[in-house]
Image: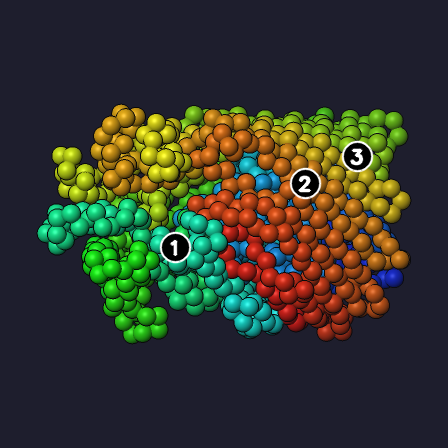
Amino acid sequence: MRAILFLALLLATSFGFSQTTVNGKVVDQNSQPVPGANIVIEGKAIGTTTDFDGNFSLETSETPPFQLRITSIGYSDTTEEVTSNNQTLTIVIDESQTFLDEVVISASRTPERIFESPVTVERIGLSEVKNTTAADFYGGLENLKGVDVNTNSLTFKSVNTRGFASFANTRFMQLVDGMDNSTPALNFPIGNLVGMVETDVLSVELLPGASSALYGANAFNGILFMRSKNPFDYEGISVSIKRGITSQEAAGDNSYTDFGIRAAYKFSNKFAGKVNFGYLKGTDWAANNQDDKITPGGTRDNLNYDGVNVYGDEVSTNIKEVALTLEGLGVLPSGANALVPSEVVSRTGYSEGDLTNYNAESIKADWGLYYRPIEGKSLELSYVGKVGTGNTIYQGTNRYNIKGFFQEQHKLEIRNDNFFVRGYVVGDKSGDSYDMVFTGININRAWKDDNTWFGEYAGTYVQATLGGATDEQAHAAARAQAESGRYLPGSPEFQAAFNRSVADPDLSTGSKFQDASKYYHADGNYNFSHLIDWAEIQVGGSFREYDLNSSGTIYTDFDGPIGYSEFGIYSQVQKTLPFEGDKSLKLTGSIRYDKSELFDGFFSPRLSAGYTLNRNHNIRASAQTGFRNPTTQDLFIGLNAGRAILVGSAESNLDRYSREYQVSASGQGLGQPSEITQTGAAAYSNSYSAASVTQLGQTGNPADLEVANPDLVKPEKVTSFEIGYRGKIDKLVIDFSTYYNSYEDFISQEVVVSPFYGEAGDGALSVASIANGDFQAYSTYTNTEANVNSYGASLGLNMKVFGNFNLGGSYTFTKLDFDRDANPDVMLNFNTPEHKFKASFGNEQLFENFGFNVSYRFSDDYFWEATFGNGVIPEFHVVDAQINYNVPSIKSSFKLGGTNLTGKEYYTAFGTGNIGSMYYLSWTINN
């Protein structure tokens, strides 16, 4: 009842104002239209932007007189007074290096200049989208200061800031018009695969670092806000056509197509609608790294070879144990095992290129209906629907071919100048997606099961040794015999086995990735600034309910969907204290309380201060705490990844994962049964650390074993401090920030080994179980007690040179403070270069209607750590460039561009394909 009364109060308050309409045009000092300029009512969250011709129309419940602030990157901001309803304005703004005057909303959930923002904010608008050197606006994010973009595939890029990056980046949040864009199955965004169509992009804002105080648990490392164009403000049809090629040594030269169209119409002052459609098709970056994961630099000549992009060779066993088993069965004569060395041998795998066609494709559409019921008000009701499907490569614990993946979103929202309430649902379907690692494994098993393959290997090794062969010759003969009957790629038998595997969700026989999960979300916010003069006060809250439904192929939901919920409430108070002259102090305090039904609640406070010395100099400082709840995978996953089994640590999940294992002949000789059943609980209550098991294998000393038994996962916390400066010295614009983060209960994965018999730490039976190979490796989800800290700084410099040329650059330093030697089993996935440098040089009007831009990126080498594999990422240098030409008479812009123009291929993560070059020509109409 209270909630209903509160909502009624919001509506009643919003109905109490009359409507004012303002029309106008924004031009530069040469009377040329300025598209994409922001027009915002001073101190309010209401505004609009100019269209391609510089025109705008603004409807608001504010009663004249009031001030409009007009800003656009590259121009000085200005104000204009509105004195009457239906007023028409012509506003002139002058070119200047003043991106600090751009208005952002994300930092405080209220409009403010970037210059005055209490935290670091990066922003791109329509002008930056037009002038980016990347192939699309999303790729252009990697040119922003302090931003890391890791390329999973052509259609899947993962954005991150301030370290702890992975493709499964649950620490970074991505919102499209207020809707979380993360997939329910994976719990993180999959780039822009099913995101926004470029012709509908209005602006993109990025907040590095923790933002939990306003945006909740997932806004832990940063948050990306993408805003689309409202059809009341942007009418007409816009089209973008882009054709080109991608060039990579492994995949060759392949065509690339990217098409987008937007249609919007304002039927009346009350009703408007829009539709968007986007289509992208190309060939993905092929991954063909043949190096041995286990022995870096090794080749197939290694007996236990596990190639980085070779799948099926993850299956291995100790051939000494195989010989003992064959003796027990009477297949080998007694004592024959003495001829067989105690060595682990792996099956022969298939290259990734044999298991995927590298088709990269994205098809997405969205539509929106917008209704403003009363002409005297800014009240707006809207429904937005989004659907998308596509093909991409995702690298998690294994490499996955995401084929025909489908995601849909549906949102209902009511808002006006002072509040919003929205609710939405996000659902996905995995389509024909499959795990390429298990595809290789199960194609092998289709032509010869593991027991037969290893039995033939051990038996042939004995026979060859008895015939006088050397160890190397015996191994070669053994593999040749075991490989007899192998399905060769391209053969009908291979294709039939491939088709069976990718259609079968049972990982013991197939590799299909199956999911139809959902989550339901509601959130709201109310700003009391129109009722209270002494400060700006906001309150809000959110609720989310998860519905996990993978039919037991990802989560332990084999007997039905798993559901749980979480909620949060927050408040923020902001006050500006004016001092003499232009000096002022802006104080902001916010606090949020979040509660998951699985964990205790948590408060996230944030305090910030921004001191403005004058119009050109601002100093800011903030301190905040943040937290993140364990993800759906941390809690409920139950997935056999080959080398290890991933088991989530929700208490109800531990015994839900269960599997039967064969006990070795040596184990049976100790009185153990031939088969045992082990549940996921063993990983958390009866396990040794993987590093100590490796040490035992090297030394043979049981004292080297260390009991693991990791604790069940709980929420992670961070305390963050940031200091920054923004200013302008003559033509030079400076943006500097430095931060320090200290983590508590850092969520990490720890690989452990559980014996099939005995109790870890007993010094006897469990040691024998490990020595006999009777154990299972698990990847557990837990919190480390180790000290984890990170710190860094970013410096951005921009200025006009040689008249109206734009020159910019940034340097970012990022450092992890963690004792790796003392914590060898803790996986942090920092995955971030210590040094990054970016630069750009361009001119939007080199001569009439012609512009260009060149960008450069440098990344220091860094260590990549993830469940798929670890390795050093070499430093790289990338140059992108574009030239563009506008034809105002047909409202068109043409762009010719290229990325990685030096042609030197590079990669940003261990195991992915090398990133080659891309060349394209685009034609954009009315955007």
Where in the figure is residue 29, as x and y percent of width and height?
88, 58
Number of the label disc, if any, that sits on residue 813: 2
Residue 144 x/y as whole percent: 68, 49
What is the image's colouring?
A: rainbow
329 vs 245, nearest the viewer: 329
Residue type at the position of mark 3: Asn
Residue at (46, 56) in percent of width and height: 291
Picture quarter with the C terminus: bottom right
**Precedes in sequence: disc 2 or disc 1:** 1
Task: Kindly report the distance in space between the C-alpha atoms of the residues bearing marks 2 and 1.
Answer: 39 Å
Q: Nearer the viewer, mark 2 or mark 3?
A: 2
Does residue 439 lie above or below 66 as drawn?
below
782 or 310, which lies in front?
Answer: 310
Question: Seen from this angle, which residue lies furthest front?
Answer: 468
- Residue type at mark 1 is Asn
Q: Is mark 2 on a helix, strand or loop?
A: strand
Q: Are marks 2 and 1 in contact (CB under 8 Å)?
A: no
Residue displayed at 81% across by 44% down: 733
Q: Which residue is drawn at 29% across and 53% down?
A: 507
Report which residue position mark 1 lands on: 302
* Residue occupying the point 18% across, 47% down: 324
Q: Quadrant of the N terminus?
A: top left
On the rendered structure, is 74 left or right of 663? right
Q: Which badge, 2 or 3, comes first in the chain's sequence?
A: 3
Q: Position of residue 554 (x, y in %)?
A: 34, 48
The type of residue carrying mark 2 is Phe
Instruction: Say whether marks 3 and 1 touch (CB < 8 Å).
Output: no
- Mark 3 vs mark 1, CA separation in Å: 60 Å
Query: What residue is disc 3 on?
Result: 618
Residue count near mark 3 (Cα–Cα under 10 Å), binned few <14, some 14–19, many ≥20: many
Q: Is 517 situated left or right of 193 in this image?
A: left
Whichever of labels 3 and 1 marks the residue nearer the N terminus, that label is 1
